[in-house]
Image (spheres, rainbow, N blue to C red):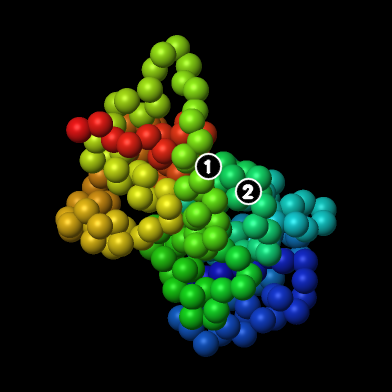
Amino acid sequence: MKVLIVDDHLMLRKGVLSVLSNSDLEVVGEASNGQEALELVPKLKPDLVLMDINMPVLDGVEATKKLKQLYPDLKVVILTVSEIDKDLFEAIKAGADGYLLKNLGPEELVSSLRAAISGEAPISSVMAAKMLKEFRQPRATTAGKQPGQQLSPREIEVLRLASTGLTYKEIAAKLYVAESTVKNHMRHILEKLHLRNRSEAVGYAIRTGLAGEPPTR
């Protein structure tokens, strides 16, 4: 699988390049800002873009938004030092497929990128905790409608667990079902909510507070 590294710090890019060179992931290019990434993606055709947030010219959130609009199937994973809530939620709303902090180890980085490519949404545990805290905040709904009311209780449960950063395999273990069953639930969630991918489903949960609502049985 081909990866494009986007970060304005040369040493960081070389460090990530070194880590990925010892894996089955191929680094096909590097960019120092979001604008360069937009120019390189159509040329290099990566499967995944590893994106920093705070960069000159065009930051990672805006670059992610533009890339996902142009290439919906392209995986974009944020790799940053920022633990700011706003950065996390804005990145997810922009369509990011994962949010990782730069203090993770080499093996964890590689496994997280593999997970993203296979359709998971890797999120560092610190940031997952922030998402859970956000979910617990009460949310007002409009026109008396409950968010996600078209979802079944089991689908709401799957969405809540997915929003914490768990993989499909981990969700399956918690619910005592097959991994394929969890993937089917997510497919139905996306169809019912008219969303394109799991990342958008997580963004929907954040915006509506749905993940903080216990499913009614």
Find the residue positioned furthest to the top.
Answer: 143
**Identity, as a three-letter code, of the amino acid under mark 1:** Glu
Q: Are marks 1 and 2 in contact (CB under 8 Å)?
A: yes
Instruction: Tell me where residue 196 sits by quadrant.
Output: top left
Mark 1, Cα crowd under 10 Å, few <14 / some 14-19 / many 20+, is: some
Residue nearest the viewer, comparing 199 with 153: 153
The label shown at residue 30 is none
Q: Is 118 rendered above or below residue 106?
A: above
Q: Is residue 203 left or right of residue 42?
A: left
Find the residue positioned furthest to the left.
Answer: 177
Q: Is 151 rendered above or below residue 122?
A: above
Secondary structure under the numbered disc 1 in the rendered image: helix
Residue nearest the viewer, comparing 10 with 70: 10
Q: Is residue 59 visible?
A: yes
| Image location of residue 101, percent across then percent down | 60, 65
- Residue designated by label 1: 134
Find the residue positioned furthest to the right.
Answer: 57
**Identity, as a three-letter code, of the amino acid under mark 2:** Asp
Residue nearest the viewer, comparing 168 with 62: 168
| Image location of residue 179, percent across then percent down | 23, 59
- Residue designated by label 2: 85
Give the Cα separation between the discs numbered 1 and 2.
9 Å
Q: Name which residue lies at 32% across and 25% down.
A: 149
Q: Is 40 rendered above or below residue 65?
A: below
Mark 2, Cα crowd under 10 Å, few <14 / some 14-19 / many 20+, is: few
Q: Is residue 13 left or right of residue 153?
A: right
| Image location of residue 158, percent across then percent down | 30, 46
